[in-house]
Image (cartoon, helix red, strand yellow):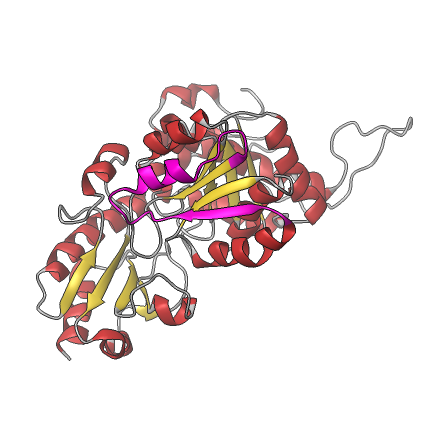
């Protein structure tokens, strides 16, 4: 045993290690299910020193196993959980200094793009966006990166909500050649399908609310770093000083959810592939956006850098424009009209109306998060809604 983790599990498959949460059996009671630590403060020694922990904003014992599983899943050197995916993502940018230059994709999670425009730029970061739906996206990225000035390149792949694909290894090469770090939002790919650190990424971000938890009952975020260096310590400092900490109950629920990650992602991928193929042939769809389809512009890159599937997210573009798309969403019965993704229930959302007038999302697009229902029921629901 090392730090409570059973080292006999180190040679087992990732699915085994995750299902058993690295095999940790903690003394003195040897519980299979780990305890929740609720204390916010810790006693000092008589000489005023802390023998262990100091205060809950610096960390909580309930985090330890969660972060150990995250490190193992991504092959990283360090991990930290946050109060939300946005808290995790923005902590990376807040660890930079005013005047630093960053490059991010045009198609990405709209909340972070909005934050970069409305908060990061006024704070002093120089922000440029590259068109990650363009066949020449890497050339554009290369043209925007400023050697010595660009400190961070941010990626999202597959990118929400069109599921555009970026070649991670090639983007890493561009970033590192300019002296910049590369961070990636890999929420949709999950560590089951893609491990960006193996492709050269410096930091991996997850909105753990989504697939990592997988039950739509926790808001959480996570960062995993390839190296425990000064920049990583600054990110941890941002978490503590901003108070972007996860509650111990939420951390415990996140760990519980992660133990079923591989099973859930496998089912979602299989169903999404089947649904994408069926919807691509439907006469009332303009296009189906899913990296698992050979017609998707990023299919070959996704096939190379993802393994075991192409994710549980897809989007359909409905003939007739925005009104028709909204009408289809209104007629769905098995799919639930709700924000978020990665849960056991299938969700549908008209993204353009959510994101507002500056969205790059087509107005005829419906985003689908495929859950664990019978795939036949999901297909039948989509067909009856499309057929009207």
Q: Is residue 164 magenta-colored? A: no
Give coordinates of residue 351: x percent, y percent: 35, 66
Q: Residue at x 20, y 48 (%)?
A: 270
* Displayed quadrant of residue 169: top left
Q: Is residue 129 magenta-colored? A: yes
Give coordinates of residue 114: x percent, y percent: 50, 59
Q: Is 129 or 228 nearer to us in this picture?
A: 129
Give coordinates of residue 209: x percent, y percent: 47, 53
Q: Is 69 or 259 nearer to us in this picture?
A: 69
Compared to residue 88, the image places residue 284 above or below, namely below
Compared to residue 24, the image places residue 215 above or below, namely below
What is the magenta range? 124-151
Residue sitting farthest toward the right: 47
Q: Residue at x 40, y 46 (%)?
A: 187
Would residue 213 appear left or right of 133 to someone viewing this image? right
Compared to residue 387, the image places residue 52 above or below, namely above
Would residue 310 appear left or right of 38 to someone viewing this image? left
On-image quarter of the C terminus:
bottom left
Would residue 302 appear left or right of 76 to someone viewing this image? left
Would residue 129 appear left or right of 86 to someone viewing this image? left
Q: Is residue 165 visible?
A: yes
Count of numbered circles on the image: 0
């Amino acid at each position: 045993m090392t730090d409570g983790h059973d080292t006999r599990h180190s040679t087992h498959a990732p699915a085994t290690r995750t299902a058993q949460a690295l095999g940790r059996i903690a003394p003195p009671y040897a519980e299979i299910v780990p305890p929740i630590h609720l204390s916010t403060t810790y006693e000092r020694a008589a000489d005023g020193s802390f023998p262990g922990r100091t205060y809950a904003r610096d960390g909580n014992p309930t985090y330890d196993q969660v972060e150990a599983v995250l490190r193992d899943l991504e092959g990283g050197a360090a991990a930290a959980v946050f109060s939300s995916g946005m808290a995790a993502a923005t902590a990376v940018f807040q660890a930079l200094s005013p005047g630093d230059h960053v490059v991010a994709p045009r198609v990405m999670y709209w909340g972070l793009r909005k934050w970069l425009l409305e908060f990061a730029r006024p704070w002093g970061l120089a922000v440029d966006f590259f068109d990650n739906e363009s066949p020449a996206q890497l050339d554009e990225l290369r043209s925007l990166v400023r050697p010595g000035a660009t400190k961070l390149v941010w990626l999202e792949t597959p990118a929400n909500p069109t599921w555009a694909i970026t070649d991670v290894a090639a983007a890493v090469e561009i970033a590192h050649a300019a002296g910049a770090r590369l961070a990636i939002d890999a929420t949709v790919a999950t560590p089951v399908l893609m491990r960006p650190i193996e492709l050269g990424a410096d930091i991996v971000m997850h909105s753990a609310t989504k697939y990592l938890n997988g039950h739509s009952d926790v808001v959480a975020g996570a960062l995993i770093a390839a190296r425990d260096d000064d920049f990583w310590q600054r990110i941890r400092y941002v978490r503590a000083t901003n108070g972007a900490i996860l509650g111990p109950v939420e951390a415990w629920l996140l760990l519980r959810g992660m133990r079923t990650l591989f099973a859930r992602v496998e089912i979602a991928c299989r169903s999404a592939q089947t649904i994408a193929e069926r919807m691509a042939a439907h006469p009332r769809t303009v296009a189906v956006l899913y990296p698992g389809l050979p017609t998707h512009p990023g299919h070959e890159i996704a096939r190379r850098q993802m393994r075991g599937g192409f994710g549980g997210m897809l989007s359909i573009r409905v003939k007739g424009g925005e009104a028709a798309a909204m009408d289809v969403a209104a007629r769905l019965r098995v799919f639930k009209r709700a924000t978020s993704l990665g849960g056991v229930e299938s969700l549908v959302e008209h993204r353009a109306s959510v994101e507002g007038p500056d969205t790059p999302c087509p107005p005829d697009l419906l985003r689908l998060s495929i859950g664990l229902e019978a795939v036949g029921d999901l297909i039948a629901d989509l067909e009856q809604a499309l057929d009207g």
